[in-house]
Amino acid sequence: MISTGVFFNNICFLKLFLVAYRTDEGQPWVLPVVKKVEKIIVHDDRLNHEYLPILGLPEFRSSASKIALGDDSPAIQEDRVGAVQCLGGTGALKMGAEFLRRFYNGNNNTKTPVYVSAPTWENHNAVFANAGFDDVRPYKYWDAENRGLDLAGFLGDLESCPEHSIFVLHACAHNPTGTDPTQEQWMQIADIMMRRKLFVFFDSAYQGFASGSLEKDAWAVRYFVSMGFEMFCAQSFSKNFGLYNERVGNLTIVAQDADNLKRILSQMEKIVRTTWSNPPSQGARIVAITLNSPELFSEWKDNVKTMADRVLLMRAQLKAKLQALGTPGTWDHITEQIGMFSFTGLNSKQVEYMVKEKHIYLMASGRINMCGLTTKNIDYVAESIHETVTMVQ
Ligand SMILES: Cc1ncc(COP(=O)(O)O)c(C=O)c1O
Ligand SMILES: *[C@@H]1O[C@H](CO)[C@@H](O)[C@H](O)[C@H]1NC(C)=O
Ligand SMILES: *[C@@H]1O[C@H](CO)[C@@H](O)[C@H](O)[C@H]1NC(C)=O
């Protein structure tokens, strides 16, 4: 008898390089609150498909800033916070980068160094380079040996870089390492950045995912605003609303004063006009309707927590299983890291072994998406890591 399944028998085709959330059944998840709001939109006969304003849907751009800054932010009360609705977090980074190249620290300035963490989401480099910055550099971040933050290296780079350099900071749930500074460490970072006149550009792509709490995950951004920084913050709603393909992002601009903000927004309008002219409405409506209704807002927070809790559970189980197996090495970093991603610490040879022998697909860097794990495959993954670490050094 010919067995057609000979090569594929028992193969667990596990894609741990995913970038999106998956349920315990391994499926994409449409948030229940999003389904509900989509129905509201369908039945609302007042809505139409006219162009949105260039800078975006007004109730999306200025709904009391419930998420990033908090609605009690002094900067908002001082009328120096504005926003541009963008195509995803990527679009927000792009608009911010284009603006900075044109107007930051001297007009048409391509020389100011832009620092991105080592390692970082790979698109950071390209977005800033394509916006015209000639000098995109890494700053020290990941300490491979200790599987944690290289704080001394990071602070050293903040001290030694040219004044006015631009720093892209991950607001929470650092991609790809899952390692964030603590509050005390953020304070040290902010002090140096203030003293050395460095520009803060937050990238907030996973708010809510790190801790399950929007407030906690916004701590760093709010702290920097309270320190009086002028700054940008690129917000993505792809992950925390599960609206990946709707391209919903928001570039928050914290300016020096109200007059300054007006000028910035008028230049932003020009940049948007020549990039996508005006933004799409569906995703922005879903987000704005949700945030502006107390009931829907609280339902959304529950949905976010459902996702975050599943990730936390998988982390706890993976660590417990590796420890129970007596897998060589320490595995505390699995639960110390937060957000969707984890740097397992597997080296490139071990990753190769996982792919070839165990058919578990992860990034060459050893990064896995915790959402690829489910209660059904976690034993297999833990046993595979155990075998790999034991067999391959
Ligand atoms: C760190 C980081 N920033 C920004 C983004 C962009 O998200 P969006 O899909 O909203 O453009 C991602 C998505 O993977 C990300 O990981
Ligand atoms: C976009 O940013 C502005 C400024 O921070 C804020 O007021 C608004 O609430 C944000 N929109 C969303 C949907 O978070
Ligand atoms: C901006 O700088 C680039 C590179 O130096 C140059 O090619 C371009 O002409 C400049 N544009 C303006 C408007 O000065």
Image (tube, helix red, strand yellow):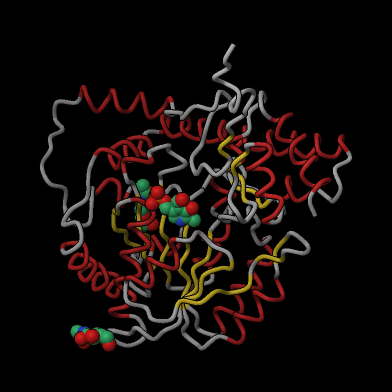
Q: Could you tell me which residue is drawn at 75 percent across and 51 percent down?
A: 333
Location of the N terminus by quadrant is top right
- Along the line of sight, which residue is nearer the eye, 206 or 55? 206
- What is the quadrant of residue 38 in the picture? top left
- What is the quadrant of residue 188 in the picture? bottom right
Q: Could you tell me which residue is drawn at 63 percent across and 28 percent down?
A: 374
Residue 305 relative to residue 45: left or right: right
Q: In the image, ligand 3 is in what quadrant?
A: bottom left
- Along the line of sight, which residue is nearer the eye, 322 or 271? 322
Residue 226 relative to residue 144: left or right: left
Q: Is residue 204 visible?
A: no
Location of the C terminus by quadrant is bottom right
Q: What is the total number of numbered labels drawn onto the structure image?
A: 0
Residue 390: % across, % down: 84, 45
Residue 206 relative to residue 390: left or right: left
Furthest-left residue in view? 50
Residue 220 relative to residue 61: left or right: right
Compared to residue 263, the image places residue 335 above or below, namely: above
- Along the line of sight, which residue is nearer the eye, 24 or 290? 24
Residue 31: % across, % down: 44, 29
Compared to residue 194, the image places residue 393 above or below, namely: above
Furthest-top residue in view? 1
Q: Could you tell me which residue is drawn at 70 percent across and 39 percent down?
A: 315
Residue 366: % across, % down: 65, 52
Residue 189: % across, % down: 62, 73
Q: Is residue 188 visible?
A: yes
